[in-house]
Structure formats: structure tokens, C-alpha cells
Amino acid sequence: MGELFALLSAACYGLAGVTIARSRNQRRGDGGVFLSVLMTALLTGALWLLVGPETTLQSGTTGKNALALFALAGVFATVLGRLFMYRSTEILGPVAAAMLRRLIPFFAIPLAILMIGDWPGPAELLGGVLVVAGMFFFAGGAAPLGTLAGVLLGLLSAASYALSYSLRKLGLLQLPDPLLATCVGAMAGCLCYVGWDLLSGNKDKCTRLHDLFADRSPRFLGTGLLLSVGQTLQLAALLHTSVTSVALIGALDVLFSALFAALLLRQRLRPTLSRMMATLLVGLGTALLLLN
């Protein structure tokens, strides 16, 4: 079940990359980054209240530690990871930026081992190798080397998301409630954005706060909804499976980005030998991860 949630999350992130690229020329403020985090907090908070807490909130040290981990993970994911992802996607395009997010497993696996002792099993390793190899076959020679700033932002995004995975997993081990985890992380992210805008810049406070809501057209709101759903599914996946599986399946977002870009941006996907090989490797690797 966790691997299926991770696969659906990758699809949401892949489609979000395309919508970010489509709306980059309409950006007046932050490109809808803050609104996407706010939507995540509101959506998951409403769902948490609707379905009821999966666990009883603890007033002791364990509950407080879990909430602190969720908040810290939210800063790395919804602030650093998401902001870097937006800017990298705007510079490099959805497919190239998604290619850099394939590096999340290379950061996530050692972090998971060091922080929570989450060693990947043989099936996870083999499936992960096949998935990552398939992604490299799919990318071919179109590696994103054209813009250094975009590449660096993409790498920072991958590292931030990888660290957030382990922090969330640590918190979920203590308080297994993915909706609460997502909501707390998003709320922490919102506070960071508002605090940063109030404490920095030459504009007055009202103007800075207005800029956070400047990009609220349907395209930006649609992106925010996709990222909210994707992040919630990712937390649900972490509750049911390992950090390694979630990180490796998340690498499939480059494939989803390419497919959605072909459909929405009319970018052609030529059936080359490398892409046929990529499809085979990704299919086998994903099957191993799902059956694990």
C-alpha cells in the first residue's frame, strides 16, 4: 500500500512540474509557492478534523518530539525543497528539473541509515537500481547542464526533500498520523514564509504580505492542489513503507513529467531504443518495489 501511495505522489509531483512551467510567464509574486503551502495546511487540517485523529495526541515528551520533527520536516520540504523546486523548474523546465529530483534517493538512503537505521532490503535495492537506471536511460543525453543556477537549485531541492523524508519517518514512528504530520509541517512552512517577508526586504509589510497572495489564478491554485495531494500521499507512503522505497519510487516523477509535458505542452516523445529500455527497467523496478 505504501508503494502505491508513493507512485500516486510521484504522478502528482510530475504533473505539478508541468503546471509550474506553464505558468512561469504569469508570475507576479512568488509564483504561488506560499499559496501552495497554505493550501496544504488547510486541506490536510480539514481532512484530519473530518476523519478524526488516527492517534491520540500525547502531552508527553514523545508527542512533543514528534510534532517538532513534523515541523522541522515541513521547513525542509515546504519551504526549502518546494521553493528550490519551483525556481529550478522555471529555469530548466519540468523534465530537466524532475531529472535532478531523481537524485533524492542518493541523499535519502544514507540519511535514513544514519538517522533511523533504515537499511534497504535486497528487493528494494534491486528495484531501486532498475528504476534509477531506467530514468537515466529515459533522460538520455539531455542532462540539465545548460544553466548552473537551475542545476544547483535542483540539487538543493533534492537534498532538502531527502532530509525531510527521514525527519518525517522519525516523527511517524512516534506518532503515526500522516494527515497531522503534513498539516503541522505546512503550518510551520507558512510561518517561515510570513516571518521571512516581514523581517526582510525594502518594501513595506503590507506590500510584502500582498505579494504572497499575488499569484492566485486557477493555474497557480491547481499547482498548489497537486503539491498538497502529492505531499499528503507521500506522508501516507512513509507510514506504510521505508524511506528508501518512497525516495526511489519518487524518482518516477521525471517519467510522469515527460508524459504530461507531451500531453499538455505538446512536447514530442520519440520512441527511441533508450526510452523503450527505460520503460522496461522502470516497469521491472517498480514491480519489485510494489511487490516487496
Image: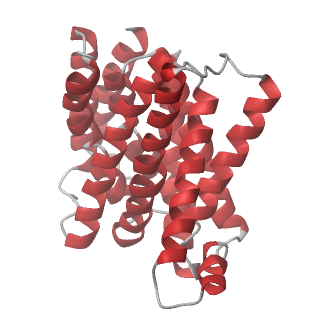
Specify the quadrant that holds the C terminus: top left
Q: Quadrant of residue 206?
A: bottom right
At a point 23% along the width and 28% down the height, the residue shown is 109
Answer above or below: position of 246 versus 222: above
Any part of residue 230 in sight: no
Q: Please tell me which residue is depicted at 57% across the width and 67% down the height of the picture.
A: 194
Q: Is residue 170 or residue 261 the one in the foreground?
A: 170
Q: Is residue 227 left or right of residue 279?
A: right
The percent position of residue 162, horizontal first and vertical second, equals 32, 39
Q: Is residue 53 above or below residue 40?
A: above
In the picture, measured across the screen, residue 132 lies left or right of residue 221, that is left
Decide if residue 207 is on the left or right side of residue 256. Answer: right
Q: Position of residue 114 (x, y in %)?
A: 20, 25
Residue 277 x %, y %: 25, 33
- Residue 121: where, in percent of width, then height? 24, 10
Tell me if residue 272 can be seen: yes
* 209 relative to 113, above or below: below
How many marks do you count on the picture? 0
Name of the residue lying farthest toward the right: 50
- What residue sits 40% from the left and 24% below the top? 170
Residue drawn where x is 40% and y is 68% of the image: 87
- The scheme the figure's colours follow is secondary structure
- Asked which quadrant contains residue 191, the reply is bottom right
Q: Nearer the viewer, residue 24 or 210?
A: 210
Q: Which is more toward the observer, 72 or 254?
A: 72
Q: Is residue 43 above or below residue 190?
A: above
For this orientation, the residue located farthest to the front is 60
